[in-house]
Image (cartoon, helix red, strand yellow):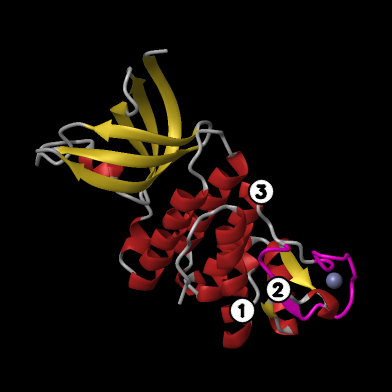
């Protein structure tokens, strides 16, 4: 039904369109993914333009027409995350976070936990330079998988339910597996298993550290879970 509505969103991606316009991929707090056209924003005098940069969190008035895309009629900044933009590592992590949301959450079903998680990650990266780490990026992705309904089984063997000898991870089984159920799995060291469990249990700001090898295994577990269950290809995080 055509009309205008208010929403809050993070700008995930912005693509040039025509002479002066942009197409925005937005993740909203109450409508999930929304695509919108921002008209004239590439003109020098556009007031909207600067507010609609990727990674910005904005309050919007959108007009819903008959087409697939809404049109932006008003935008106010909630948070521009200006500090993180000056730090390459933080900016890279913030872009990775937006990219993961772009890939994993593509429906217009509202998902408030996913929205809150993204906002939390961006404001942490903005406020605390030391959080721009691989461990932190993996913790974010793991929590995002949970919010999207694809969290891996970590407490017991995903195939037989056994709670011991969990030394491998099977994307097809959907989590950690025991020695008897290792077919199609890859090794998951105790360090990596502990990292996944702890990262999921703790707040983002308290992401545990882990050895490089453990982080690589955790990375693989997350990427392959997304691929197998959500049919989404995430890039590994370095
Ligand atoms: Zn088993």
Q: Is residue 95 above or below residue 192?
A: above
> Is the C-beta separation of discs 3 and 1 under 8 Å?
no
Pick whichever, 10 or 37, lies toward us: 37
Front label number (3 vs 2): 2
- Left/right placement of residue 200 relative to residue 1 reads right
Determine which residue is flagged by label 2: 169
Tell whether position 166 is magenta.
yes
- Label 3 and label 1: CA atoms lie apart by 21 Å
Determine which quarter of the picture holds residue 238.
bottom left
Pick whichever, 175 or 8, lies toward us: 175
> Is the C-beta separation of discs 3 and 2 under 8 Å?
no
Q: Position of residue 194 (x, y in %)?
A: 74, 76
Determine which residue is flagged by label 1: 217
Q: Crowding at label 3, few (<14), some or many (≥20) Cα neighbours within 10 Å?
A: few
> Is the C-beta separation of discs 1 and 2 under 8 Å?
yes
- Left/right placement of residue 148 relative to residue 127 reads right
Is disc 1 placed on a helix, strand or loop? helix
Is disc 3 placed on a helix, strand or loop? loop
In this view of the protein, can residue 211 be seen by the observer?
no
Which residue is depicted at the point 46% across and 58% down? 97
Q: Provide the major secondary structure of the magenta segment.
A: loop
- Specify the farthest residue to the front: 183
Determine which residue is flagged by label 3: 149
Q: Position of residue 136 (x, y in %)?
A: 55, 69
Q: Position of residue 40 (x, y in %)?
A: 15, 33
Which residue is depicted at the point 43% across and 54% down? 98
Tell whether position 157 is magenta.
yes
Q: Is residue 28 above or below residue 92?
A: above
The range drawn in magenta is 155-173
- Label 3 and label 2: CA atoms lie apart by 18 Å
């Amino acid at each position: 039904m055509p009309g205008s509505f208010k929403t809050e969103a993070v700008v995930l991606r912005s693509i040039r369109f025509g002479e002066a316009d942009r197409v925005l991929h937005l993740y909203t707090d109450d409508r999930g993914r929304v695509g919108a056209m921002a008209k004239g924003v590439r003109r020098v005098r556009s007031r909207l333009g600067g507010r609609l940069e990727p990674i910005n969190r904005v309050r919007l008035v959108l007009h819903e027409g008959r087409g697939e895309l809404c049109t932006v009629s008003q935008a106010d900044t909630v948070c521009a995350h200006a500090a993180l933009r000056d730090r390459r590592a933080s900016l890279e992590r913030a872009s990775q976070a937006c990219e993961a949301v772009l890939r994993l959450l593509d429906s217009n079903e509202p998902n408030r936990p996913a929205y809150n998680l993204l906002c939390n990650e961006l404001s942490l990266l903005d406020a605390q330079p030391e959080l721009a780490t691989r461990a932190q990026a993996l913790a974010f992705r793991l929590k995002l998988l949970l919010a999207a309904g694809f969290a891996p089984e970590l407490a017991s063997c995903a195939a037989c339910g056994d709670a011991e000898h969990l030394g491998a991870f099977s994307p097809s089984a959907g989590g950690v597996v025991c020695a008897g159920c290792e077919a199609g799995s890859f090794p998951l060291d105790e360090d990596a298993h502990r990292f996944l469990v702890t990262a999921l249990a703790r707040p983002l700001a308290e992401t545990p550290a882990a050895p490089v090898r453990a982080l690589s295994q955790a990375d693989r577990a997350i990427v392959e879970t997304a691929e197998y269950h959500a049919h989404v290809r995430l890039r590994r995080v370095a």
